[in-house]
Image (cartoon, rainbow, N blue to C red):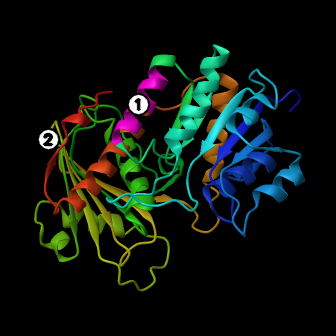
Amino acid sequence: MPNRPNVAIVLNVWFPNSHADVFLSRLLEGYRLNGVSHRPRLNTVSFYVDQFPTNDMAREQAQEYGVRICKSVHEALCLGGDKLAVDGVAVIGEHGDYPRTPRGNFMYPRKKRFDEVTAEFQRAGRVLPLMNDKYFAYEWADARAIYDRVKRDRIPFFCGSSLPLTWRRPALEFQRGVELDEVLAVSFSDLEEHGYHAIELLQAMVEKRKGGETGIAEIRYAEGEAVWQDKSWSRELLDAALKHRVNHVPKSTEPDQAIFVRYRDGLKATILNLNTQARDYLFAAREKSGKMHASCFYIQLYVHNHWGFMVKHFEDLVLSKRSPFPPERTLLANGIMLAGLDSRLDGHKWLPTPHLEIRY
């Protein structure tokens, strides 16, 4: 593709199988989706990298592809000059050696990087298409501030988890106006890092329900036997979801975890983090009519080909300057995750969430 737009990538760290690796390897070299090869439609010209561990890949890959490694976000966006010299930016703010907050989530500097990028937009008097990998921030005030800045400045913006984009086995897509009674999603591994993906895939499904999204009323965390002693959620939905597992489940002694969500319109949702029963992301729902649905959101564990969808949407964002999905989805999912972790810290209580009265 001649005259490809130039893009800058701002990342925490690049090591094997990190978010930077599964994204950038495809952005630089191309990717395959559904048996079709796609060559890069963007020209990656600069990296800002925050950390260089012993298994760093950024330096060698930058040399291989002729990408400039910069000492600051300003240099990455301006390429050593005073004016914006790229056509788009992606912030890959996952992984790296960062501390955790008291509630247990990693203090990834997504808000700091967003502020540095948008400071360059403000100085230039114009905005560029901007991708923010995964959720907004590890504190609610910062997450809300990012969202508000995106809306205020009308930044063409792509954010969120890769899970809403991946294959569904079996195929499952709700029509707008679906009347849902209860939904459930299953994840595995670390609750904050991987449970978040289940939260956002669930939100991507339920936002299509009748009346649209009206927000969350309250949230509670549970752990161990308390998950199974709680009678407010449907074991029938879990059984339906588990039927669609793909990957082998190794033995685990990690406690089962749950985040219970009550939406303002009465919808009930449960996010289960089950290292003892799953190595897949699963979803199940029951309509008010009683009809059941279930699917595996398939990620090709260890291969990560579903990240081709993330690269495709970033390319589309830069080329079209149009946001592909509502950022409210990620904002609400970010808030659910943080409220669940707050409940864990606060004795597993139900916590009211008036700040999550988010409509879209």
Residue 147, horizontal then vertical, whole percent: 43, 30
Looking at the image, do the residues carrying marks 1 and 2 touch, with CB atoms under 8 Å apart?
Answer: no
User: Which numbered tag is attached to residue 145?
Assistant: 1
Q: What secondary structure do most residues of the magenta stretch adopt?
A: helix
Q: Is residue 288 left or right of residue 298?
A: left
Is residue 52 a member of the stretch shown in magenta?
A: no
Q: Is residue 92 left or right of residue 210?
A: right
Distance from the alpha carbon under mark 1 to that under mark 2: 28 Å
Q: Counting residues from the N terminus, which is met first, the one under dot 1 or under dot 2?
A: 1
Image quadrant in which you'd find residue 127: top right
| Amino acid tagged 2 | Gly
Q: Residue at x 16, y 63 (%)?
A: 347
Residue density around tag 1, few if under 14, some if 14–19, many if 20 or more, within 10 Å:
some
Residue density around tag 2, few if under 14, some if 14–19, many if 20 or more, within 10 Å:
few
- The answer to whether residue 128 is seen in the rendering is no
Above or below, comparing residue 281 to residue 353 in the picture: below
Disc nearest the viewer among 1 and 2: 1
- For this rendering, which residue is in front, 58 or 262? 58
Which residue position is annotated with label 2?
A: 266
Q: Is residue 178 left or right of residue 33?
A: left
- The answer to whether residue 188 is seen in the rendering is yes
Extreme-top residue of the structure: 125
| Amino acid tagged 1 | Ala
- For this rendering, which residue is in front, 154 or 213? 154
Is residue 141 a member of the stretch shown in magenta?
A: yes
Magenta stretch?
Answer: 140-151
Q: In this view, does 118 lie to the left or right of 100?
A: right
Q: Which residue is drawn at 86% across and 33% down?
A: 1
Residue 61, horizontal then vertical, whole percent: 82, 55
Above or below, comparing residue 274 to residue 60 in the picture: below
Above or below, comparing residue 112 to residue 256 in the picture: above
Kind of element beneath mark 1: helix
